[in-house]
């Protein structure tokens, strides 16, 4: 395990039980947690993106702010739903954010998950072409985005521009060199993982995937990672790809931890339906004393296959407690997994 970061959904609710009661709380605390995570030695600050929900939805202003407040930690998403995105405008946002952060952006994109409203992307002005699905549309948007990030000119310049142009066709600006190699695809199936490999994207595998063979979640996920790496090799890419997996992991080191997570209610995989006819398997959570966690995590085949582990954090419990969660893992568990 080379890198460990956190993944926040950025929930907020006006409930008195929450430390995050508004969008302002969610955004500002996300920045504070990224700063704290960097100080603790964590490698990444990642944020989930959901529309029409009391969660983080517009990641680029947040990531740019994190980039301006930190100096080392990777900053990313897991994932941006490409059904909602204008890939050209997104390329400009991504380029600017990457430059602000000094080249630390690790951008996770995907077809996305079921949202809070029916066909929410239609409200954003997008819809699949005849004979295509919303997943086809997302992959097309992703391909346009990837092509744009190459930084090759494609637009015919105005012969009487407001400002002088460089020679030739024009590209979008600002262009951030190297960002194209730091794009990840969030894959729920083996087939989309292989597709991502062919296009030269890194792989993000979440705490759920389509149940393709009935095996335990971590084994299915490990098989997905191996299929992805085989497809990457077959595509002939020169660089080595990166692979991340997400997990809910809590080291029980004090009474707060035991009160919040000591019940062991989610210690097994769960089966459900994320769409009407799509059976999915959801990975278990881990919560135990550090010595027990080390033994359990050593048996997780997908963690062993990945190079990056994203710890999903309960952001509604506030920055201080989440920093404690990260510190407990980094101090008592991560070294035994080969980190650092």
Image: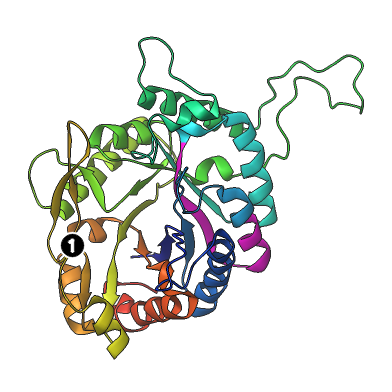
Number of marks in picture: 1
Q: Secondary structure at mark 1?
A: loop
Q: Residue 119: which quarter of the image?
A: top left
Measured as percent of width and height from the top left, residue 67 is found at 63, 61
Pick out the residue farthest to the bottom. 254
Structural crowding at the residue carrying mark 1, measured as other residues with C-alpha within 10 Å and reported as few (<14), some (14–19) or many (≥20)? some
> Residue at coordinates 8% horizontally, 48% vertically from top-left?
215
Q: Is 74 a magenta residue?
A: yes
Measured as percent of width and height from the top left, residue 110 is found at 41, 38
Q: Which residue is mark 1?
A: 300
Q: Is 122 a magenta residue?
A: no
Pick out the residue farthest to the top. 130
Left or right of 166? Residue 293 is: left
Confirm whether residue 129 shows in the render: yes
Q: Nearer the viewer, residue 51 or 223?
A: 51
Confirm whether residue 177 shows in the render: no
> Residue at coordinates 54% horizontally, 78% vertically from top-left?
39
What span is colored magenta in the figure? 64-81
Q: Residue 2: which quarter of the image?
A: bottom left
Q: Nearer the viewer, residue 112 or 139?
A: 112
Rendered-image quadrant of the N terminus = bottom left
Measured as percent of width and height from the top left, residue 250 is found at 28, 75
Q: Residue 7: which quarter of the image?
A: bottom left
Q: Height in image: 189 above or below 160? A: below
Q: Height in image: 281 above or below 9? A: above
């Amino acid at each position: 395990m080379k890198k460990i970061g956190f993944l926040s959904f950025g929930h907020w609710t006006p409930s008195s039980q929450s430390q995050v009661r508004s969008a302002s709380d969610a955004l500002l605390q996300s920045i504070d947690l990224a700063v704290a995570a960097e100080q603790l030695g964590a490698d990444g600050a990642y944020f989930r993106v959901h529309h029409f929900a009391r969660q983080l939805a517009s990641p680029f202003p947040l990531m740019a702010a994190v980039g301006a407040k930190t100096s080392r930690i990777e900053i990313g998403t897991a994932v941006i739903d490409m059904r909602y995105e204008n890939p050209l405008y997104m390329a400009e946002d991504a380029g600017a954010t990457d430059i602000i952060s000094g080249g630390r952006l690790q951008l996770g994109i995907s077809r996305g998950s079921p949202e809070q409203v029916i066909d929410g992307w239609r409200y954003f002005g997008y819809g699949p072409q005849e004979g295509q699905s919303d997943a086809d549309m997302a992959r097309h948007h992703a391909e346009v985005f990837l092509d744009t990030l190459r930084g090759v000119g494609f637009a015919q310049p105005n012969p009487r521009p407001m400002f002088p142009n460089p020679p030739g066709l024009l590209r979008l600006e600002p262009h951030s060199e190297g960002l194209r190699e730091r794009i990840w695809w969030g894959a729920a199936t083996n087939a989309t993982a292989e597709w991502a490999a062919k296009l030269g994207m890194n792989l993000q595998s979440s705490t759920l995937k389509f149940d393709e063979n009935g095996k335990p979640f971590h084994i299915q996920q490990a098989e997905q990672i191996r299929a992805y790496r085989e497809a990457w090799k077959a595509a002939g890419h020169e660089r080595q790809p990166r692979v991340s997996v997400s997990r809910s992991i809590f080291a029980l080191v004090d009474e707060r931890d035991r009160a919040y997570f000591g019940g062991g209610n989610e210690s097994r995989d769960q089966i459900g339906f994320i769409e009407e006819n799509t059976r999915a398997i959801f990975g278990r959570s881990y919560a135990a004393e550090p010595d027990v966690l080390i033994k359990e995590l050593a048996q997780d085949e997908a963690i062993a296959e990945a190079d990056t582990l994203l710890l999903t954090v309960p952001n509604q419990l506030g920055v201080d407690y989440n920093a404690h969660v990260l510190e407990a893992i980094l101090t008592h568990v991560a070294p035994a997994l080969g980190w650092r």
